[in-house]
Image (tube, helix red, strand yellow):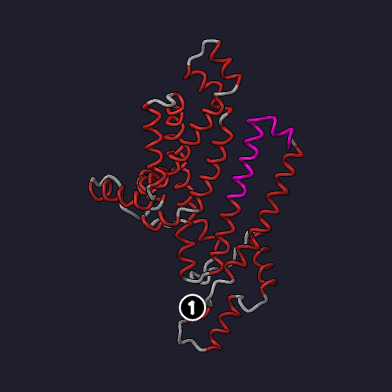
């Protein structure tokens, strides 16, 4: 197990180092000067040069990369060019919107997908299975931003059950905050639940063909008992892979939904940073999201080892 952990930690560190280089290089090659953007088209060259020096944009790229990387490692993400406040403050304020939204969407997706996948696997080739496969295919095909607009029209404007956008802040109370996040969470959860349900069905059907499952059936267990007691745990590895990918996607990829519902989350912060040429915000927030993705992948690897001891021995 120790060798397994060491190998995964080394892989995590290498991935972070490569990701930091790619993110810094990608952001730096984007055309446009942040200082000139902030001062406007008619700014004097010496004024632009002074602002570039103040923002630390006049140094060599390798030196700027090392300064940025060292700050990230010590928790100093730099100062936003636009808001003139530490990036860490912006991240913490937005994280309290994006993280609950991600967890909310994950909970809805998992609570819907696993029972649906079980029903489809238990009724393979029958009407229930065909209905589930058709509905999940539709859920994958429908763009989540289009579904989000339908939710706004139906449940916000039509019925008035939920707000159409914005976030009141958690200081307004738990229920107002959850109401504001419900429609975005549902819009994010629908395609993810469809994918997870199909993976759950496929994984259960593959596991159901194993010898120990046939032995369980021969002992007189019902199809439901066989799936729940024996097949589900051994089918969890592909499901955990999808859950890890979905968490990463929902945390880092909810930019469109956050803009549809005007939510002050990390995705909207990145979008604003790109439009305002706030390079330090884009670099730091993107690196944090990459770090979250890599850590989740590492935790999923550990989950594999806990579920299947054979993987620990191979590692």
Q: Residue at x 65, y 32 (%)?
A: 306
Q: Residue at x 56, y 36 (%)?
A: 238
Specify whether residue 143 is painted magenta.
no
Q: Quadrant of the C terminus?
A: top right
74 up-or-down from 296: above or below: below
Residue at the extreme right of the image, as rendered: 3
167 up-or-down from 39: above or below: above
Under circle 1, the secondary element is helix
Q: Residue at x 55, y 43 (%)?
A: 244
Q: Which residue is mark 1?
A: 37
Residue 19 in the figure: left or right of residue 80 = right
Residue 151 percent location from the top left of the image: 31, 47
What is the tally of numbered marks visible in this picture? 1
- The residue range painted magenta reads 293-315
Residue 131 percent location from the top left of the image: 36, 32
Residue 187 percent location from the top left of the image: 38, 47
For the residue pair 200 and 73, the one nearer the viewer reads as 200
- The 10 Å Cα crowd at callout 1, few under 14, some 14 to 19, many 20 or more, is some
Dividing the picture into quarters, in which one does residue 55 lie?
Answer: bottom right
Residue at the extreme front of the image, as rendered: 125
Magenta stretch, main secondary structure class: helix
For the residue pair 252 and 43, the one nearer the viewer reads as 252
Dividing the picture into quarters, in which one does residue 219 lie?
Answer: top right
């Amino acid at each position: 197990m120790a060798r397994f952990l060491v190998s995964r930690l080394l892989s995590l560190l290498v991935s972070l180092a490569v990701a930091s280089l790619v993110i810094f290089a990608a952001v730096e090659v984007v055309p446009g000067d942040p200082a000139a953007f902030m001062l406007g088209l008619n700014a004097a060259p010496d004024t632009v040069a002074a602002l570039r020096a103040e923002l630390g944009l006049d140094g060599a790229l390798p030196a700027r990369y090392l300064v940025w990387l060292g700050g990230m490692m010590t928790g100093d993400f730099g100062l936003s060019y636009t808001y003139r406040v530490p990036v860490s403050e912006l991240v913490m304020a937005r994280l309290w919107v994006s993280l609950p939204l991600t967890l909310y969407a994950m909970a809805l997706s998992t609570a819907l997908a696993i029972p649906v996948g079980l029903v489809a696997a238990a009724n393979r080739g029958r009407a229930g299975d065909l209905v589930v496969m058709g509905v999940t295919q539709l859920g994958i095909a429908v763009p989540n931003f289009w579904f989000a607009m339908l939710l706004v029209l139906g449940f916000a404007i039509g019925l008035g059950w939920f707000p159409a956008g914005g976030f009141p802040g958690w200081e307004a109370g738990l229920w107002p905050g959850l109401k504001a996040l419900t429609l975005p969470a549902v819009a994010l959860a629908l395609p993810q639940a469809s994918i997870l349900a199909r993976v759950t069905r496929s994984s259960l059907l593959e596991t159901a063909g194993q010898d120990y499952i046939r032995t369980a059936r021969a002992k007189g267990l019902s199809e439901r008992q066989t799936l729940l007691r024996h097949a589900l745990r051994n089918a969890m590895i592909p499901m955990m892979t999808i859950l890890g990918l979905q968490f990463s996607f929902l945390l880092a990829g909810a930019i469109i939904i956050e803009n549809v519902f005007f939510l002050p989350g990390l995705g909207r912060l990145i979008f604003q940073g790109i439009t305002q040429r706030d390079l330090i915000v884009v670099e730091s927030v993107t690196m944090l999201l990459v770090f979250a993705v890599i850590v989740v992948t590492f935790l999923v690897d550990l989950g594999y080892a806990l579920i299947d001891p054979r993987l620990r021995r191979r590692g």
